[in-house]
Image (cartoon, rainbow, N blue to C red):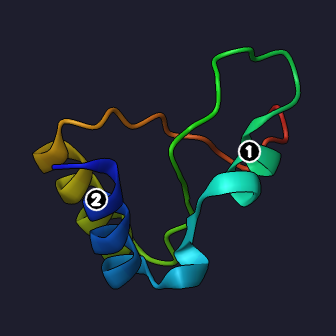
Amino acid sequence: MAADDLIRKLKAALGDAGVLTGKDAEEKAVGGWSNLGIPVAVLRPASTQEVSAALKLCHAAGEPVVPWGGKTGL
């Protein structure tokens, strides 16, 4: 599954506001001590059902997922 196809499916499952890409994803991901690179997307699921849907789609596409909390350090 191509990245564009995965992004389209993720937006269908999470809504446009639930999938950040491009500069929006970069702004959320860059900073702090991590130098891991820029993600294809940053997902912001609003429910456990959306988390499940997103993980299923990413798994089917072979796309790695890095869980990230509220960035509070706690």
| Three-letter residue code for mark 2 | Leu
Q: What residue is pinned by disc 1?
A: 26
Quadrant (top left/top right/bottom left/bottom right) for the C terminus: top right
The picture places residue 51, in percent across and down from the top left corner, at 36, 63
Point 17% across, 45% down: residue: 61
Answer with the quarter of the image where residue 31 lies. top right
Q: Are marks 1 and 2 in contact (CB under 8 Å)?
A: no
Residue 65 place in picture, x, y as percent: 39, 37
* Between discs 1 and 2, the one toward the N terminus: 2
Q: Residue at x 73, y 14 (%)?
A: 35
Q: Residues within 10 Å of mark 2 (few under 14, many from 20)?
A: some
Residue ID for mark 2: 6
Residue 71 locus on image (x, y percent):
79, 41
Mark 1: few, some, or many residues within 10 Å (few <14, many ≥20)?
A: some
| SS category of the residue bearing label 1 | helix
Three-letter code for the amino acid on which mark 1 is drawn: Glu
Residue 38 vs 20, above or below: the answer is: above
Q: Nearer the viewer, residue 41 or 53?
A: 41
The residue lying at 28 percent from left, 59 percent from top is: 6
Quadrant position of residue 9: bottom left
Quarter of the view holding residue 32: top right
